[in-house]
Amino acid sequence: MNEELYDDYILDHYECPYHKGHLACPTCAHSEKNPLCGDQIRIELKLNDTGHVEEAFFNGKGCAISQAAASILCQHVEGKTVDELHRFQAPDMLRLLKVPLTATRQRCGLLGFKVLKAMMYSLDASPTPPAQQPTANDESIVATSG
Amino acid sequence: MNEELYDDYILDHYECPYHKGHLACPTCAHSEKNPLCGDQIRIELKLNDTGHVEEAFFNGKGCAISQAAASILCQHVEGKTVDELHRFQAPDMLRLLKVPLTATRQRCGLLGFKVLKAMMYSLDASPTPPAQQPTANDESIVATSG
Amino acid sequence: MSTPLETPSRPFDVHDVRRDFPILARPLPNGATLVYLDNGATSQKPLLVLDKLREVEATYNANVHRGIHQLGDRVTVELEAAREKIQRFVNAAESAEIIFTSGTTMSINLVAFAWGRKFLKPGDEILINEMEHHANIVPWQQTAKATGAKLRYIPLTADGRLDASHFDRLITTKTKLVAVTAMSNVLGTLNPIRELAARAHQVGAVILVDGAQSVPHLPTDVRDPAIDFLAFSGHKLYGPTGVGVLYGRRELLEAMDPFLCGGNMINEVHLESSTWADLPSKFEAGTLPIAEAIGLGAAIDYVQSLGFAAIHAQESKLLEKALRLLPQTPGVTIYGPSFEHRGSIVSFTVEKVHPHDLADLFDQKGVAIRAGHHCTMPLHDWLDVSATARVSFAFYNTEAEVDALIDAIHYARHKFRLE
Amino acid sequence: MSTPLETPSRPFDVHDVRRDFPILARPLPNGATLVYLDNGATSQKPLLVLDKLREVEATYNANVHRGIHQLGDRVTVELEAAREKIQRFVNAAESAEIIFTSGTTMSINLVAFAWGRKFLKPGDEILINEMEHHANIVPWQQTAKATGAKLRYIPLTADGRLDASHFDRLITTKTKLVAVTAMSNVLGTLNPIRELAARAHQVGAVILVDGAQSVPHLPTDVRDPAIDFLAFSGHKLYGPTGVGVLYGRRELLEAMDPFLCGGNMINEVHLESSTWADLPSKFEAGTLPIAEAIGLGAAIDYVQSLGFAAIHAQESKLLEKALRLLPQTPGVTIYGPSFEHRGSIVSFTVEKVHPHDLADLFDQKGVAIRAGHHCTMPLHDWLDVSATARVSFAFYNTEAEVDALIDAIHYARHKFRLE
Ligand SMILES: Cc1ncc(COP(=O)(O)O)c(C=O)c1O
Ligand SMILES: Cc1ncc(COP(=O)(O)O)c(C=O)c1O
């Protein structure tokens, strides 16, 4: 099984990532770092008035798994509603990757997912509804170790 | 071998100890306690002008081994010179007991010996020669945990 | 402390159980058969545990949480599985509240340093009592000295229990910590943890329970009654030496700073300062006792396969018999409370035979007990004896071994020409 | 550090030696043969050690220093024999200077608390450097914070050695402690302990040597050069997890107060205060990692049966080959000094393949290495890479395994479509 960990699907996303870069005006953004391996992921979302993800971008550096997973995640969330993102769970993310990950590598595969979840959490905690959130160009809205 | 640990020699000394009690005017005295088992031994010596042990007394409480060993020690040192006491070593003491002791029980069998040695050491350290040492009726000349 | 008992997976038969402990059947160097009544000092380990240790060491020995390789993955999974077993065993809310330490002593010191030195101040009171093991006294003496907090002692009743009539006077808003053993390692006294926990929490204090003696013998539930910190050792719980556990309520562990510093407990290290990892790593600096922690998980499997109901039934039978026969034996004085108030530990003296001599003569007959102050000098001062002889039972002990104990007392008295 | 080499009791033949480590011959779960190049994280244990552990646990398991019974006596004798083996192994003046701890991390923390917090004051300087393991940085950061002492860092040369041109400036009468690793766990750098010890002592400072990586691979003599504190771990020295050693010079240990408190480390305990036991017990609170300490003694026997001359010869051969072949492999960058200045550790990166991916792909071929910051974040900041791949050799590694490493790099590059 493990033999297929670095299959074309993962490597294609690693080499030609989907939406790697920055949004001009993200509705929300968040970064995190896995200090154990130094992997970093930032995710930026643009939400529209109906609470749908219009665009998702990521940026970061790290291993093929963490970077490909972030790319796959961005592709996946576009068009989803905030509600759907709330329901999106770690096992769903792991399934998206289509490769089996050991406990240690799951930390890599789930880094982007963690960033997304932290962002959703801070959206909930914010008093203004998502669509009216101020846009952010600083490195992070929610201060983290990123 | 161990079967003979509590032989008549040890038990006789335990039940009818030699010179258990106090000297009226000891030349030197010292007490120690083994905090691990609570055994206590005090030894008092009377030295004469020629540096011989005229009388040796002990007092204390504890197990048969520690108490019998102190009794045997007092009997042994009488008549010896300070010099001979200096040369008297732990293996000699263990030999005197005539029974084999395990590492743990050697602490019991050597408690009186340790008291004697500490006393000899403090005699050496003292500026006045032994014969001129002040006598002591307090519980201990050398302050220890006794 | 009570927890829903796990369903035991086998019927209890002491002779069958003893086969899991090969040491119990080996002749001693002097030819005698071992009668091991020193379980309070350390317990024997079943084959299941020995085999688990060997499995770790010989088939997937690696460091945890670090290696991206098959050995490292396996050992990490096993270690975390052990943590979860312990979590369920004491009914902690989450496995992150289970900190691996080197033993009870380290667990209590961790709290004394990381909680005590941070949160105690002059005027605060730490409530302990004279029956505690040195491990639950000396760290608090030192913490009191360092912080200006005051140590207070709950008086004991004549039969060696905490005197509840002083609780009102002693547990006040000044009290910040109640540190108490669930079972005395000398008197066997089972302390009223439920009542103490409730009273501590009423006044806003924290309760630390020394479970070194109780956890191996009684079900433990850190949420009923609610306990803030629980410390215990692997080696008394049929597991390996070198590993112990601190359970701490998340809220408290979060509020504490780390104690030991090094690898694994950090998040980021910069030249001048560092940030800390999440629980449980925050309190697990350096390489853990890996094989030992996994072995402890196996020991817990073993205990649960027997079930505490069966363990308790067997140990109670032994305790009842010892408490019945010992007082009938000439010269014997026993210390501590009556059957209802104690776990399976009995300390005693025999008139005219010092406990060390007793232990030595017992040993000639293969009966292994402990003699001394058992790391409870204040208790022995209170009892006004310098040493006692202690028997401490485990479920693998038999009624015949209680008879062997009584015979050994007669033998010692005979040797001492007392009968 | 040099010590008269023990006469090895057997000629060195790596294939013969490998038979002592059954794990090296077992197929991995994925069917590959293990190529264990992660010895810096933890070493494998020879059968001699595994059997010794089993012997302790299955035939004389008991608590030490306490029981007056045959098991207790035997285990106490074995434990003290292990202490004496360690004493001779590092050439300490007396066995009381050998303190059993739970590992290097604990050993260093012990010094940071019991020596550092007692003797350091504002204005004093602690000299460390950026190549240290977190275990030899974070405790000093915390101690500096607690005492007002200042941390200073010896700069590194471009090839990852301590820059001796700064010693004069940095080692002054303000310096109270030099804490330094004898061998870097990332760069393999062998530090000039002799020169640092001499300079530290000239200014009246104390030197602590982190021997976690050096002690398993090179002879150690704490009296030549004179070292004040030495810390190392059992699990990197072919022994068990859960045990480590602190060597301390008697005079320093005597001047320190105890660190952890509890049983064994006391002389007398009274209600309000206590007095301390003699060395080494003063620093050994609670039940020791008994089986583990005895197992470490067996590991030392094993090392000495091979002899450091043979161990060093084998490891040098592997290091030389790795340092020769790695730079010839496309995309590879290696970090750290040249052959003469390093022990058998090499960290590297492969262009376009993250170390974690490397480690994972290596694992498919059975090659176990470590990827990450190896508990040296400041060093990785200095190297300006977030992670490296590390191979660390032991005497049981073979030249064929170095070839397997190179093949694994090609395999990873191939998988990443780089060749
Ligand atoms: C140089 C160095 N120091 C300290 C340590 C910490 O050792 P341990 O984790 O056994 O406490 C290590 C190993 O991780 C090391 O390589
Ligand atoms: C009640 C109690 N507390 C604490 C301890 C200390 O445990 P350890 O020596 O395993 O740290 C013991 C055992 O000696 C004990 O019986």
Image: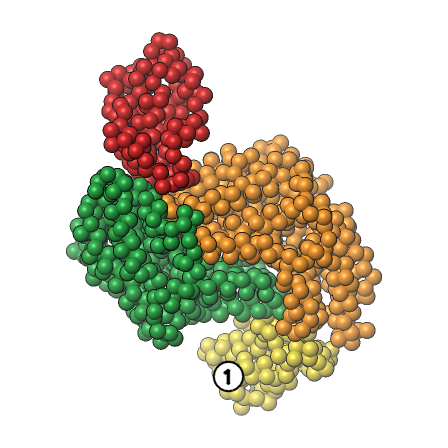
Chain colours: A red, B yellow, C orange, D green
Where's the C terminus of chain C, which quadrant? Answer: bottom right
As drawn, is C406 to the left or to the right of D402? right
* Residue in the picture at 68% in, 55% down: C17
Give the structural element (helix, strand or loop) at label 1. helix
- Residue D357 in sight in this render: yes
- Residue D417, quarter of picture: top left
Q: Amino acid at mark 1?
A: His
Residue for badge 1? B86
Give whichever of B144, A14 is nearer the camera: A14
Between C196 and C59, the one lying in front of the other is C59
Residue at mark 1: C-beta within 8 A of ligand 2: no
Q: Depth check: D219 or D395 in front?
A: D395
Which quarter shows the N terminus of chain C? Answer: top right
User: Which residue occupies the extreme right position in the image?
Assistant: C328
Return the chain for callout 1.
Answer: B
Seen in the image, is D394 located left or right of residue B83?
A: left
Residue D411: x and y in percent read 27, 46
Front residue of C98/C371: it is C98
Q: Is residue A142 visible?
A: no
Q: Is residue B8 above or below residue A44?
A: below
In the image, residue B107 lies at what x, y percent?
58, 72
Residue drawn 39% across and 15% down? A81
Vertical side of C87 occupied by D162: above or below? below
Identify the residue at horizontal 43%, vertical 48% (top origin).
D29
Q: List x then y, in percent, for residue C234.
A: 56, 52
Q: Is residue A54 above or below residue C29?
A: above
